[in-house]
């Protein structure tokens, strides 16, 4: 049965070993992300992770990965006791999920569904509805971990440089995630999101599909843009 959804973001600097001297700058985001992962693990030991990547893919519960491609060979696993060789090409959303799982909820096990960044809103809605049917058919609790980032164009030093449309778009997105505005998420335009660097658009539209007509109860743990990228952490309960 679908029990809860945790919303986190995916900056590699979330990992202290990768952040180095900048670890203090992401401390609040890290603390909030770990709290969300713990809250999810307390409600459901089995997680489905939703993230966004260049192409569609799935990551099984026995997968291992490494942040070596981001500068440091920090190993992660999607479940405890996994002995597989670390995959250097594991999607970032899965790496973040695996690290949060190990740090905050080591008893949990996760699989990941990575949707392509250009996935249509219609397909996202359909995927979310199928996932909800699957979750509710299970006898045990199932948690959803959504790994998604907002606009990367919020400041001049942001990865996507500054776009003067981005601050307002990010404020609207933050509000929708604060209050669980499913219709707003469903109506996010893929082209506008691409232009503003809102990378998490497809993942949030899958989230809206999972909730369907159920208005979520929302609790925001963090919102901010320490590097000119919009990050949001929270819990949604059906």
Image (spheres, grey):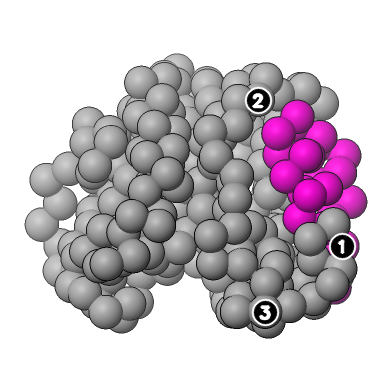
Tell me which label, 2 or 3, sits earlier in the chain: 3
Tag 3's secondary structure? loop
Question: Which label is found at residue 189?
Answer: 1
Q: Identify the image quadrant of residue 140.
A: top left
Tag 1's secondary structure? loop
Q: Which of pointers 2 and 3 indicates the residue nearer the eye?
A: 3
Q: Residue at x 71, y 34 (%)?
A: 178
In this rendering, the answer to whether 108 lies above or below 200 is: above
Question: Which label is found at residue 218?
Answer: 2
Assess disc 3: are there few (<14), some (14-19) or many (≥20) residues with their C-alpha within 10 Å of its C-alpha.
Answer: few
Q: Are marks 1 and 3 in contact (CB under 8 Å)?
A: no
Position in image of residue 119 (x %, y %): 73, 66
**Range of residues picked out in magenta:** 169-191
Assess disc 1: are there few (<14), some (14-19) or many (≥20) residues with their C-alpha within 10 Å of its C-alpha.
Answer: some
Towards the viewer: 163 or 111: 163
Q: Residue at x 61, y 64 (%)?
A: 229
* CA–CA distance in space, label 2 to label 3: 31 Å
Tag 2's secondary structure? strand
In this rendering, the answer to whether 221 lies above or below 171 is: above
* CA–CA distance in space, label 1 to label 3: 24 Å
Q: Main secondary structure of the magenta part?
A: helix
User: Which residue is disc 3 drawn over?
Assistant: 156
């Amino acid at each position: 049965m679908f029990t809860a959804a945790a919303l986190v973001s995916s900056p590699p600097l979330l990992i202290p070993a990768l952040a180095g001297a900048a670890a203090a700058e992401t401390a609040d985001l890290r603390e909030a992300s770990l709290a969300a992962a713990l809250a999810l693990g307390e409600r459901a030991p089995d997680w489905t992770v939703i993230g966004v990547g260049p192409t569609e893919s799935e990551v099984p519960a026995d997968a291992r990965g490494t942040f070596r491609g981001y500068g440091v060979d920090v190993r992660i696993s999607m479940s405890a006791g996994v002995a597989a060789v670390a995959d250097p090409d594991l999607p970032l959303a899965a790496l973040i999920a695996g690290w949060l799982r190990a740090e905050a909820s080591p008893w949990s096990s996760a699989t990941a569904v990575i949707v392509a960044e250009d996935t249509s809103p219609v397909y996202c809605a359909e995927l979310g509805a199928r996932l909800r049917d699957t979750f509710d058919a299970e006898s045990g609790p199932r948690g959803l971990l959504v790994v998604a980032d907002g606009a990367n164009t919020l400041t001049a030093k942001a990865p996507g440089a500054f776009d003067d449309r981005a601050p307002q778009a990010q404020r609207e997105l933050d509000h929708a995630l604060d209050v669980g505005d499913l219709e707003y998420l469903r109506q996010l335009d893929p082209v506008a999101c691409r232009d503003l660097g809102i990378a998490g658009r497809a993942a949030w539209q899958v989230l809206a599909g999972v909730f369907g007509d159920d208005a979520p109860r929302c609790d925001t743990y963090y919102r901010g843009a320490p590097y000119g990228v919009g990050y949001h952490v929270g819990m949604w309960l059906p």
